[in-house]
Image: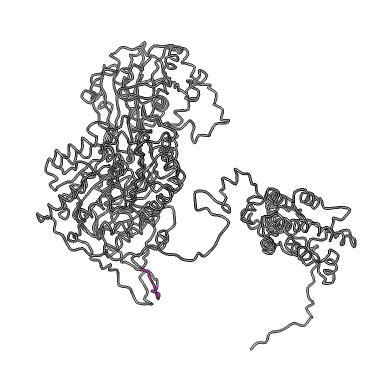
Amino acid sequence: MSSKAIREYDAKLLLAYWLERAPAVEASAQIATPFVFPQPKVAQVSWDPATNAITPDTQIPSWVFNAKLVAKPDQLIKRRGKAGLLALNKTWEEARQWIAERAGKPQKVENTVGTLSNFIVEPFLPHPSDTEYYVCINSLREGDEILFTHEGGVDIGDVDAKALRLPLPVGKPFPSRQTIASTLLKDVPASKRETLVDFLIRLYSVYVDLHFAYLEINPLICLDGVNGGQPTIHYLDMAAKLDQTAESICGPKWAIARDLTVYEQGAPQASSKGKSVSADRGPPMVWPAPFGRDLTKEEAYVQKLDASTGASLKLTVLNAEGRVWTMVAGGGASVVYADAIAAHGYAHELANYGEYSGAPTEGQTYEYAKTIIDLITRGKPHPEGKVLIIGGGIANFTNVAATFKGIIRALKEYKSGLQAHNVRIYVRRGGPNYQEGLKAMRLLGESLGVPIHVYGPETHITAIVPIALGIKKDTKSVPPSISQTPSAPGAATPSGDAVPEPGVGTVNADGTRQQPNDQIVRFDTVGSQSQRPSYRPFDANTRSFVYGLQPRAIQGMLDFDYSCGRKTPSVAAMIYPFGGHHIQKFYWGTKETLLPVYTSVEEAVRKHPDADVVVNFASSRSVYSSTTEILSFPQIKCIAIIAEGVPERHAREILYQAQQKDVLIIGPATVGGIKAGCFKIGNSGGMMDNIIASKLYRPGSVGYVSKSGGMSNELNNMLSLYTNGTYEGIAIGGDRYPGTTFIDHLLRYEADPECKMLVLLGEVGGVEEYRVIEAVKSGKIKKPIVAWAIGTCAKMFTTEVQFGHAGSMANSNLETADAKNAAMRAAGFLVPDTFEDLPTVLTGLYNDLVSKGVIVPQVERDPPVIPMDYKWAQDLGLIRKPAAFISTISDERGQELLYAGMRISDVFKEDIGLGGVVSLLWFKRRLPQWAAKFIEMVLMLTADHGPAVSGAMNTIIATRAGKDLISSLASGLLTIGSRFGGALDEAASMFSTARDTGLTPREFVDQSRKANKLISGIGHKIKSVNNPDLRVELVKEYVRKHFPSHSLLDYALAVEKVTTSKKDTLILNVDGCIAVCFVDLLRDSGAFTREEADEYTKIGTLNGLFVLGRSIGFIGHHLDQKRLKAPLYRHPADDIFINMADVAQPRVLGRMA
């Protein structure tokens, strides 16, 4: 959502801080009087449900204790005075008692009941009634508007009728002081006009700079100056909305105004100990729920999920005891399902409203589904059971099967609860991979013991609602149409003609040479744009740029082009400012073609003069700057803005610039649109299976316009079933200020002779449908229109509910869906009784037009076959291939990283330590605690052995040569082998083989001596029997204490007795001791078979321990040398014996031929 209400407390803090600091809206908009800025005196008192107490006095500002006060609830409640929720002229003791008596108590305001939990306290201001004024700044599509009246206060009456208005159109200069005064302040005493002009200038500057969407002050007080001073401004009641999508721009400005330390001089900074660190100075803005709609724990959790993802996750619990629950994919679809449930008389049983969309991950969908299913399975079972509708439209790009995996996980988790509450589940979905998703749901029903009824896109989107509710409804069965309209002007035949392929060896224009088996299809760049009428922005020759690296969307566009029989791809190039120039390959049918990627719009436009459409995938933060840049090139005639969350002020400025340059804007927050048989914007129409099923590869006769991208796919599907299909369809986007509106596109369709009938899918909120009504009444639109406004369920809700789109909220009765449907029906539109009846109305109109000869059915043609992408075919389970690699130790593909099947969170919960992690990744199993600790002991013992050993010396020399950490470490590790550090494997093998073959310790020593072979693990340069190696002693002590058996260690110590009898330094060294003990661990821990233990010994596991441990020391030596800034090392020449061969010695000479 974009425009969201904030508390009066926060609105007043924003004004208090920024009224004198915000930059002027224009250089000429300056104050002209010694303006006295209002003092920032406002306090907030909150009720804590956990302690049932209000904010303590220690957290209240000091001025409160010495002033007469006003106290009132601050929870977006209108007309508080009339509801008796106003305490006037009170001391703090009186105000606190008044608040305490009401805090935490239910309060009825008109028809809404809510709990009072937040209050605002401010100084009481005695004033004459004739000093009360009213001011309101409101944002509209065309610009902002200031409303002012000299009579403010509680009895202001009809503001719309009596207020004076000053429009501030987008792109126009800010009015002069004289204009402001003469337009708004003509009824204000002359002595106050200049002060009020200054206030309005500063107020509007703050409004613009902080991205307000609405700001109302009533009453605004302007008191006479004291002793000849300036009049002073005070604001009593205030209501405000901010554009939440501007948080990335204004978040720091909003936050600093909420930092209370900036208002009281000398106020101590709050200690940050134990508190979370905010991203900005001051706490972030709070977005309160409407009064009576306190967020439940579940709603707050889903809101948190939504804030942490680019997808959309929404949940509003309407009636926790209700029987009918929904889990709907898509903003528009969620409203349609709620409408259908309400239309069948089950609004009182509708338990929730919500939606998930924007391709959430399996994990996000799981969390969302789990939250709803947990609510369903609470409390006592209902005697009639419960219904869960898992619905949705036909997705454009969301992998249905992937999102269903998350839902299925949640359903399995609540199996017993679903059975106990007798829950019946009804599923309807379409889109990418929907077949696999529905199949998984059907199989789940068989194993879950819960009835799951599954339907695909062949079923009308809301047809499952009466089925789920047990309602028998007589609906006419309408057979799908098989007719087709004639090809649109300029439409290509399905030849797929490209530039003739040159023969092998031919040199191309760019210097490349044609190679044998070359699968690259090349297309000539058209010299200039094709000429087409203004009402037809897209045809079979339209060429476009895609702004952003969007290979999936581009491939979808090219596949659509090929299925339509276009001669050239509709995408000329990509624009990606963050990467260098390069090319990317895409499929063109069964072959491939190359598309260039440019870093600037200027270069793309210069090299492709035939492209006049841009599909802009830039993010909401950069879409304003990128679109403004694109608009500077006259070649571009249409821009589709895909991003959601574009700040409303930016959207309006884009709209203004586009109107000045006569550029068609589609979006923001849109999937785009489609011209059947000609051109597809981005992901519009979904994947190829849906495009073919909806017959979008050839033109039909119906032009439609909708806000919802998901519902556009539903319309494509419906029109293919009940008419001869789509001619053109546009999703204008769900934001409050789309670049183009319903009327813009319907007027185009009216002017296009190939478009025979129109469809308008409106929704609750806004007034754009009324512009279409006026066009029909005035005769501008004469073609028949089938229309419906979704959101008819809104009247059923007792509190304010924000539907799926930012603009779908009625601010007056005129904006309700019911009012719109009634007005359209009265104007002659064909309006069904419910959305479910839309197919019947479509069929009736289509058949009528066919009978009159307006539409002439044509014979269908089969589109060319588009091969399925390998990855997608693999996802669908249609193909298989052997894996190039096999890994059995870890997996990061799911929601959580796994080590040998153990979740990473459990690794820390169970505190298995580094030894436990090594056991999982090296041995694929949990070893006993004593074994894991032994591994950690080995790593600590082998971490380092001083700087003089070869590995450490190599590391040091490489570091001093200026090498980086990785290079220096690798230099040291490469010295490890049989002479240095690599004796563990060999020692383990020699000792275990000797014992396994039955040799006594003495026989083992004698045999090795006879073979002139040293015993690995025996001998030390310094240590001896009388000067033992303490590392060995530590190992022996641990093993004897913790190992269940240490037979090979005992054997090795017996060998040591033999060898030390000959020389006291021939002791069991640390390598040998670790080696034999590790063999004991492998053989006697009970975790391995004998064969597994021997295999791990053979494949280098023990040397791995030395490598892992010694890496710690090598890294230490590298960091030590870097810290010391040691210079390049050169070995002293006197430490090297150099022996050059005598020159007189005979040499081998080569003979010259």
Q: Position of residue 841 (x, y in %)?
A: 17, 47
Residue 620's image quarter?
top left
Q: Where does the N terminus fall, quadrant-wise?
A: top left
Q: Is residue 811 above or below residue 96?
A: below
Instruction: Name the residue located 44 percent from the left edge and 21 percent from the top edge.
Output: 43
Name the foreground residue: 711 vs 1079.
1079
Q: Residue furthest front?
A: 383
Residue 523's image quarter?
bottom left
Q: Position of residue 1127 (x, y in %)?
A: 70, 54
Dominant secondary structure of the magenta stretch? loop
Q: Over which residues does the magenta segment extend?
A: 513-520
Q: How is the image coloured?
A: one colour
Name the foreground residue: 681 vs 523.
681
Name the foreground residue: 22 vs 135.
135
Q: Position of residue 132 (x, y in %)?
A: 30, 17
Report how many numbered discs are placed on residues in the image.
0
Q: Is residue 1057 above or below residue 363?
A: below
Q: Residue furthest bottom?
A: 1153
Q: In this image, 747 relative to 461: left or right?
A: left
Residue 399 appearing in the image: no
Name the foreground residue: 43 vs 905.
905
Q: Where does the C terminus fall, quadrant-wise?
A: bottom right
Q: Position of residue 393 (x, y in %)?
A: 31, 48
Q: Is residue 104 above or below residue 325?
A: above
Q: In this image, 784 relative to 244: left or right?
A: left
Q: Is residue 189 above or below residue 729?
A: above
Q: Is residue 60 magenta?
A: no
Q: In this image, 719 relative to 1089: left or right?
A: left
Residue 921 appearing in the image: yes
